[in-house]
Amino acid sequence: MAASSWGKFSNDLGIDLGTKNTLVYVAGKGIIINEPSVVAINKKTSEILEIGEEARKMIGKTPGHIETIKPLKHGVISDFEVTEKMLKYFINRINEENFSLLSRPKVVIGIPLDVTEVEKKAVADAARSAGARKVYLVEEAMASAIGSGLIVSEPTANMVVDIGGGTTEIAVISLGGVVSWKSLPLAGNEFDNDIIEYIREEFNILIGEQMAEFVKITIGSVLPLKEPRQLEIRGRDLFNGLPKAAFISDAQVREAMLRTARKIIDNIKITLETTPPELVADIYERGILLSGGGSLLRGLDRTISQATKIPVRLADDPLTSVVRGTGVLLADQKLLNMVSLS
């Protein structure tokens, strides 16, 4: 009775707690929040200054007493206290228009495939401390498949490759569970780091994370582009410490990211090798689904298809497939009970 009374006044939530971005889906309303997973803190007073996009703008630009923290690494909580405050901030934002003080939502959260029991507990505890009434944990690859419209409860295989900010989740799904999988600490952030390292070695220029991401999005690719492109980069000269600019080509960016792209493809092949033959036949027929922001890298889908000899397709909205999957589960308690790890 008490649980139903709480639920009556609450906005049930689906959360994609990502390394780079946190997305929140509100039942009946859709995706309400899509903000960077960044928190700015005053180290003198321990006061939270900004959360989300405003905090992201501060990265690399703060004085000594202000620190910008990314409380999630490779999709799991690295700073429990800051994550709790970030979740509480987002939940409070959603409930601003709710007149009731009794609003305690049911929350479905996507988590990586290889998290430990301790890490699962940390995620659930952070959500409860932030005001959740009941917490369900769902594997991100499973949520991504559901959010992309795949039927996961049948005895047929679906293969999902979810390339996020901190992790790449490779999973073969059948009968509401994950049959074989790989979880890699290689994803969008690693592509950025590859670009930073390449520019340091080739140009003797140190650039920041935001510049590296801009380069990746603007001219990054895995296959040659139809027309060669180049982009001006600006950073600090490693020899004299002064500002310096140079031009980088799409071919150079491709060379920088090649190692990480190959590792992802190799692990997709390894996952297929450990999958039962009957399910591999289904995958060959149905193809591989790519989701997550990293899947938008130009030519990555075609490169994976060429390497595996299996059709590859992009999710309709790769950036939001996980959180949309949690939204579907909020409305389908039976399916939620089947796929939940709670």
Image (cartoon, helix red, strand yellow):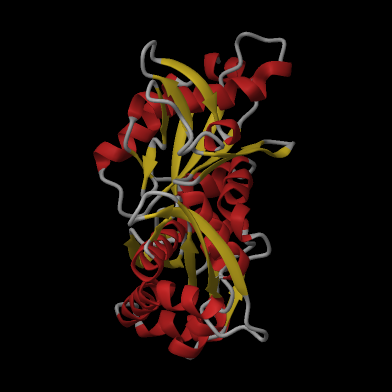
Residue 167 picture quarter: bottom left
Q: Residue at x 52, y 33 (%)?
A: 58
Give the quadrant of the N terminus. Answer: top right
Q: Looking at the rendering, which quadrant does residue 218 occupy?
A: bottom right
Image position, residue 122 (x, y; %): 32, 32
Q: Report the residue at 55% width, 52% height from top.
A: 322
Image location (x, y in percent) of residue 144: 54, 57
In the image, is residue 196 above or below residue 84? below
Number of numbered discs present? 0
In screen coordinates, is 133 left or right of 314? left
In which quadrant will I find the C terminus?
Answer: top left
Q: Residue at x 66, y 59 (%)?
A: 317
The image shows residue 11, relative to residue 45, as above or below, that is: below
Judging depth in this view, the residue of 249 and 83 nearest the camera is: 249
Vertical placement of residue 76 versus 197, above or below: above
Q: Position of residue 15 (x, y in %)?
A: 54, 39
Residue 152 in view in this figure:
no
Q: Residue at left 51%, top 78%?
A: 222
Please tell me which residue lies in front, 182 or 278: 182
- Residue 256 at x, y = what percent? 41, 73
Q: Name the one closer to the observer, 246 or 212.
A: 246
Q: Nearer the viewer, residue 328 or 39?
A: 39
Residue 94, can we see it? Answer: yes
Q: Is residue 260 left or right of residue 17?
A: left
